[in-house]
């Protein structure tokens, strides 16, 4: 029991090195946090606002409206909420061409395998059970954002292709 508590504390305090280009991009990255629990909204907002622009919503219906109007770069949502739950929110997001590309992380107290599989099957990119480690959430966020930036660069032709281009010299 004592060893487990020490391991959990060390995991919680773990930090990871992010690529420099992601560190520079973070200030302009918008994250929508959707949760009906005010204390969870406050905790996530306070923990993430130093690196991201945070937008909050108190239920899935409000979250969907904000997602369509603000086009965030990442969405973090609870599963169990009034008006529209997280599963319905993800279905609505993935069915809307304006926002279907946005990565979604689900956080939930529903920890059974079938609940987690349903979230991912619905279209969530990640499903973290509550209580979660903030360091794990930040790492998942970083990976999803980094991958999205890579894909965005590939489709817009912004990635360097120096290995594929033959140098030409003029005399």
Image (cartoon, rainbow, N blue to C red):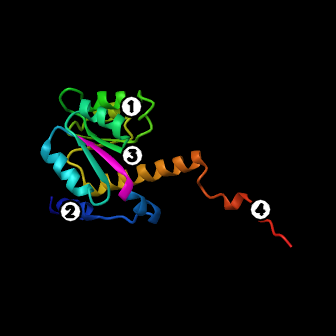
Residue at (59, 53) in percent of width and height: 158
Where is residue 136? Give x, y as percent: 31, 54
Secondary structure character of the magenta stretch overall: strand
Where is residue 26? Give x, y as percent: 38, 58
**Between tags 3 and 1, which lies in front?**
3
Contact flag, marks 2 and 1 (Cβ < 8 Å): no
Q: Earlier in the sequence, mark 3 or mark 4?
A: 3
Q: Earlier in the sequence, mark 3 or mark 2?
A: 2
From this viewpoint, which residue is outermost toward the right? Answer: 171
**Stretch in magenta:** 27-34
Q: Quadrant of residue 93?
A: top left
Residue 124 lies left or right of residue 9; in this view the side is right
**Between tags 2 and 1, which lies in front?**
1
For disc 4, the marked residue is 166
Q: What whole-number distance in Å separates the C-alpha atoms at marks 2 and 1?
A: 32 Å
Relative to residue 83, is residue 142 depicted above or below? below
Label 4 Cα neighbours within 10 Å, binned few <14 / some 14-19 / many ≥20: few
From this viewpoint, which residue is outermost toward the bottom? Answer: 171
Relative to residue 164, is residue 120 depicted above or below? above
- Quick one: SS at disc 3? loop
- Quick one: SS at disc 4? loop
Q: What whole-number distance in Å separates the C-alpha atoms at marks 3 and 4?
A: 35 Å
Q: Is-magenta flag for residue 32? A: yes
Label 3 Cα neighbours within 10 Å, binned few <14 / some 14-19 / many ≥20: many
Q: What whole-number distance in Å separates the C-alpha atoms at marks 3 and 1?
A: 21 Å
Residue at (20, 56) in percent of width and height: 46
Contact flag, marks 4 and 2 (Cβ < 8 Å): no
Q: Is-magenta flag for residue 10? A: no
Q: What whole-number distance in Å separates the C-alpha atoms at marks 3 and 2?
A: 30 Å
For disc 3, the marked residue is 73
The mark found on residue 9 in the picture is: 2
For disc 1, the marked residue is 121
């Amino acid at each position: 029991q004592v060893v487990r508590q020490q391991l959990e504390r060390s995991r919680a305090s773990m930090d990871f090195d992010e690529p420099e280009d992601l560190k520079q991009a973070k200030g302009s990255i918008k994250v929508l946090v959707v949760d009906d629990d005010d204390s969870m909204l406050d905790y996530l907002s306070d923990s993430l606002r130093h690196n991201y622009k945070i937008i909050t919503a108190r239920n899935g219906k409000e979250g969907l409206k904000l997602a369509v109007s603000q086009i965030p770069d990442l969405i973090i949502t609870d599963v169990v909420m009034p008006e529209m739950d997280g599963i319905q929110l993800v279905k609505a997001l993935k069915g809307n061409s304006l926002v279907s590309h946005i990565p979604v992380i689900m956080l939930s107290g529903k920890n059974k395998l079938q609940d987690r599989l349903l979230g991912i099957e619905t279209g969530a990119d990640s499903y973290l059970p509550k209580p979660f480690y903030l360091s794990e959430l930040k790492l998942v966020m970083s990976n999803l954002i980094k991958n999205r930036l890579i894909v965005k660069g590939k489709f817009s032709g912004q990635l360097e292709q120096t290995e594929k281009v033959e140098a030409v010299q003029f005399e």
